Image (cartoon, rainbow, N blue to C red):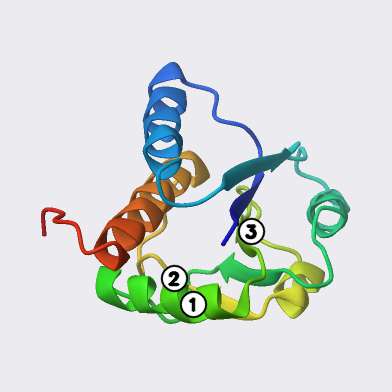
Amino acid sequence: MPVALLCAGRLREKYWQDAAAEYQKRMTRYSKLEIIEVPDQPEGPQAMKKEGEMMLSHLRGDDYVVALCIDARAMDSLQLAAFFREREMLGSRVVFVIGGSLGLHEDVLRRADKKLSMSPMTFPHQLARVMLLEQIYRAHKINAGERYHK
């Protein structure tokens, strides 16, 4: 089952790039993983809308879209693993959407099939991306029956 991360902005610092690249490399054993970046927009009245339009242009009709939102319900690692097992039976690409500093436009949130919180705390989107990649990797390890440190 293919997995994609659709992100506003790019990873600027080398240490974030290196961390993300490591999890992308590890994931090659389990699933196709795609990172899609749209340019983050400078603050302004239309910034969030433009960012949202760019994000929506990368989504396919059969994608299962998971929007990261601070006010959504969280899952632990075992629940995320179960989520992937369920989605794998259905076969569509799972796309996790991470907004920029402005959040996600309401059109993106309406398109989402599921909303997911990583924590009630707010994280920079660069850190959130690395944390999500780690959790996706962990879920695939769990589903493969392999040990992964708890």
Q: Looking at the image, is 2 positioned above or below residue 15? A: below
Q: Earlier in the sequence, mark 3 or mark 1?
A: 1
Residue 104 in which image quadrant: bottom right
Q: Quadrant of the C terminus?
A: bottom left
Kind of residue at disc 2 = Ser
Kindly report the distance in space between the C-alpha atoms of the residues bearing marks 3 and 2: 13 Å
Q: Nearer the viewer, residue 74 or 63?
A: 63
Residue hosting label 2? 117
Point 37% across, 30% down: residue: 22
Horizontal and vertical percent for residue 56? 83, 60
Q: Earlier in the sequence, mark 3 or mark 2?
A: 3
Point 72% across, 69% down: residue: 63
Question: Dot 2: what SS?
Answer: loop
* Mark 2 crowd level (few <14, some 14–19, many ≥20, 10 Å Cα): some
Kind of residue at disc 3 = Gly
Residue hosting label 1? 71
* Mark 3 crowd level (few <14, some 14–19, many ≥20, 10 Å Cα): some
